[in-house]
Image: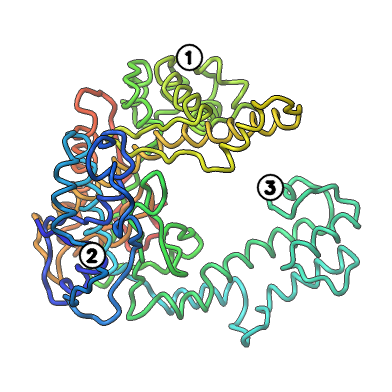
Amino acid sequence: HWVWDDTERGYPALLDAGVRVERGIDLRLSHAILRHSVLSADSRLATAPHSEWDALEPTQTDDGGLFSLTTSADPDPLAEFQLQREATTDARLALLLAAECAGALAAAEMRHRGLPWREDEHSALLTELLGPRPAAGDRPAKLAVLAERIREALAAPKLNPDSPVELLKALRRAGLQVNSTAKWELYDKQHPVIAPLLEYKSLARLLTANGWHWLDTNVSGGRFRADYVVGGVVTGRWASKGGGGAMQLPKSVRSAVVADPGWKLVVADASQLEPRILAAMSGDEAMAGAGRAKDMYSAIVASGAVATRDHAKVAMLGAMYGATTGDSGRLMPALTRAYPRAIGLVESAARAGENGEVVSTWLGRSSPLPGSTWLETQSKASREGATDADTSRARQAAKSWGRFTRNFIVQGTAAEWAMSWIALTRAGLFDLAGWRDDSAHLAFFLHDELVIHTPVAHAEAASRVVADAATRSGTLLFKNSSVEFPLSIAVVDRYSEAK
């Protein structure tokens, strides 16, 4: 194992020098987990006053140097390493740290290798959808035409459709009873402005998120290099930094992701991951039976729990995210009767959150405590003389935090499965072809989807590697569970062909 303060600081220069690290310990990432986990709560690390390690943020060296001189302000890595070893007495926690650190290595390698990207095709796509590239500060031609149609339909000749405040006022003046300019609130309204406005919002989003400026800034040398933040979300899911938006790469631009000549993209998608995670971690045998099917939602219907596949999906999402109204609320009693242990698990997590308690993922990542505003709201409602409004605010705040903790255990455990999947796929690809410029390698990760860039000759073997890694990840986390984690795997030339 390599031991360093931060993979983002230590690893890129090694990769540039042609050195691949098989295993590494990231002290910054590990410290963040151990500081807050209930499984290490009694350790010296967790009970010590806050230190420099708590203040460290994800960074990258800007001088390109492999090692920099230690200053008096730098925290002591050896002392921290010893504290972390003492704190890691639980096997689940050790597995979580190993997966987190392996994920950091994989993230750096994916940035180093990059996702193949055809700049010419992306630019042509933008021209087709938006019109020719405009001068700085101008709208593309198609957006300009749509903006004029919106103004005419609303009788608002000076309207700026990019201003939510102006647009909302214009919509209301036109007789539309809306509370926002969000798509979901507009799509079912009957008015001549709706069609051009929805089209405008869609194209404007493309221009802002993945337009010409994005292309100039984030794609170079035929590669998009995702700037991941491992553990960037409180549940352990990855985030991205900068303007690249790696965790929000829309389908509309995926046709520009094209394998190099003589290469293929292997796109592997973990099907219905979070419902399977809930089935496995709860030990609910009935739900585990559904989790052995390729399509878990259809299996839930076949069990008689609900009538349709759409109902199964809505009900499961409601269970994991705490929806209590509409179809989700109506279907919850039936789902609870069919899968009492699974629903009981998320309900218990929700009650803990409502009471201001901590919950943990399967491997031991623990949720934060609610903040001071939440605590003050609860305290105020319990004081003598509290008003009905105080009580209502406290109840709403408690329910909101309960929805967070309900989802925390499922989303966080899904992130643990995904990190294990990444780590095992990474190791399997190295065993397949080593670490060379012409070897199969991880190129992109998006929540529950992996993209491998591989020579054509290794595409079939790479597909087996990623499928085997998914199976092994399930076994690694849930040794006694019968839940399966199937993948949808496509070997394609373009990312867009996988869906």
Between the C-alphas of marks 1 and 3, the distance is 31 Å
- The single residue placed furthest to the bottom in the displayed view is 135
Q: Which residue is mark 2?
A: 109
Location of residue 482 (image quadrant)? top left
Location of residue 242 (image quadrant)? bottom left
Query: How many numbered discs sit on the rendered protein?
Result: 3
Mark number, residue 184: 3
Give the residue displayed 40% in from the left and 34% down from the top.
Answer: 410
Give the percent coordinates (x, y) of residue 26.
Answer: 21, 56
Q: Nearer the viewer, mark 1 or mark 3?
A: 3
Give the percent coordinates (x, y) of residue 98.
Answer: 19, 47
Q: Amino acid under label 1?
A: Gly
Query: Regarding mark 2 in the picture, which secondary structure is present there?
Result: helix
* Residue 168 relative to residue 78: left or right: right
Give the percent coordinates (x, y) of residue 417.
Answer: 29, 40
Between the C-alphas of marks 1 and 2, the distance is 46 Å
Give the residue displayed 75% in from the left and 57% down from the top.
Answer: 195
Q: Amino acid under label 2?
A: Glu
Residue 328 versus residue 398: which sits nearer the camera? Answer: 398
The answer to whether residue 425 is above or below residue 59 is above
Q: Which residue is mark 1?
A: 304
Give the percent coordinates (x, y) of residue 473.
Answer: 22, 39
Which of marks 3 and 2 precedes in the sequence? 2
Q: Amino acid under label 3?
A: Trp
Residue 154 versus residue 357: which sits nearer the camera? Answer: 357
Mark number, residue 339: none
> Label 2 neighbourhood size at 10 Å, few (<14), some (14-19), many (20+)?
many
